[in-house]
Amino acid sequence: MRLAAVISASLLLHTAFGQEPPTPAVTLNVAEKTLNVNGKNALVYSLTQDNGTRGLTLQQGQTFSVDLNNKLTIPTSVHWHGLILPNNQDGVAFVTQYPIYPNHFYHYEFPLKQTGTYWMHAHYGMEEQRLLAAPLIIKDPEDAKLADQEAVIMLGDFSFKSPEEIYTELRRKGRPMNKMESPGKGMKGMGQDLVDVDYDAFLANQRTLEDPEVIEVKPGTRVRLRIIDAASATNFFIHLGQLSGEAIAVDGNRIAPLKGNTFELSVAQRIDIIVTIPKEGGAFPILAQGEGTRMQTGVILATNGSILPQLSSQADKQAGALTNEQESRLSALHPLEKREVGRKIVVELGGNMQDYIWTLNGQVWPESTPLVIEEGQRVELVFKNKTAMAHPMHLHGHVFQVMEVDGKAFRGAVRDTVLVMPNSTLSIQFDANNPGVWPLHCHILYHQVAGMFTVVRYKEFEQPL
Ligand SMILES: [Cu+2]
């Protein structure tokens, strides 16, 4: 009641002064829900609008105006992944805001500067593992020219164990030391570590292949798949099956079209792929197989009346490891302008597998020295991965361009999350044009919690908390 009164009063005020009325806020609710996975119920968290829609679809140039309600019995916070926004809107508990306590809400409001495929997820504790994530799509008027139809596929990894149990086990058992050592020269990939957590299922739009989502499509049309890896710790191979596709964007940013039938997608990344449905119609599974596992998930694109195939959550063969190959072939449609680097920072990715501790420059969050940059600088971050595991590194509040992989310079994709391969060096550049204190971290949830997290801080920016 009180809220309604406030809104109408502010509407009146704006009209009285001849201003545009404010964009009405959309309500997003974080709540508990029961999800049935493979015949068994589990407690997960949902992130939906009042009408039950998961996440948000907004239009280019709109104001992001959201009331985020916490209907859980524990605190939460939600991060708008990939968005360029004011620092105090970033949604990171204990960095840019205090957590939202149960039965409280937080209002977010800022102008949207981008279009594309983004997502939102918990940035408090390990709530993300309980599926506290949802799509965040910002439509471009040009989208209609690219495809006849769109489908969002949000991938996830699921365990009947609580995230606390998973993390405790990881810490207790650690890993055999030999797995931590660098692979010898000439045996690349041999000593590589692919999987930390043994999941019970992989999900696509919260369903398994035993009961997949079937998306109706029309013969001869182009369908844009907006695929989001919202898993806590799983990289995927995307298999288009009988279809071939063209990737047109990564992390919301357009790329020079890349044709293919299989694509790689790391934790927290997105890829937009356009597929053409054959004129004769049919049913076309789009599968996502977890790196280093036989487990897979997916959806089925099907034309009206087609016979749906029976699919299994187990693939015939175990998947290998993601590589730098796809990344090296990507190039941004709208690259950063060429500029001298004003500040170069080496970020060493390290770890101690025996104790399951993960580090950036040898430090464990929150005992970390911020990486200080100055507004106006072109900044280069050089990630040196000294571990046997790949780390999807994510920078908040900015987009960056991938510039160099293992000494090979190129002008790659503009992104917000990049997978740094084991025993590999990868450089990114970005323009320091958004003052704040911005998280820079590995997006594997358990690495992040175990210390692989720091902040990039603009000099003279006043710490918000
Ligand atoms: Cu990591």
Image: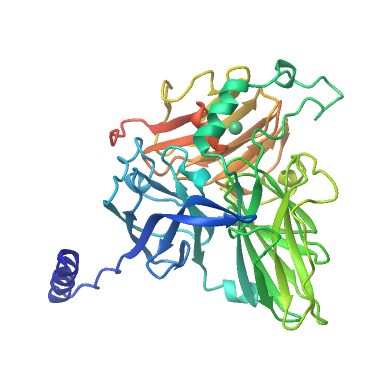
Q: Position of residue 442 (x, y in %)?
A: 55, 35
Q: Is residue 159 left or right of residue 365?
A: right
Residue, x 39% and y 54% (percent of image)? 30
Tell which of 125 and 186 is nearer to you: 125
Q: Residue at x 35, y 30 (%)?
A: 459
Q: Position of residue 277 (x, y in %)?
A: 76, 75
Frontmost residue, 330 versus 76: 76
Quadrant housing the C terminus: top left
Coordinates of residue 275 in the picture (x, y in percent): 73, 68
Does 9 appear above or below 399? below
Look at the picture and state if 83 lies above or below 457: below
Quarter of the figure with residue 147: bottom right
Q: Quadrant of ligand 1?
A: top right
Task: Using the image, determine if residue 373 lies above or below residue 402.
Answer: above
Q: In the displayed structure, would residue 20 be above or below residue 72? A: below
450 or 97, which is in the foreground? Answer: 450
Where's the N terminus, which quadrant?
A: bottom left
Percent x, y of residue 34: 49, 56
Which residue lies most toward the front here?
A: 40
* Residue 148 seen: yes
Answer yes or no: is residue 59 visible: no
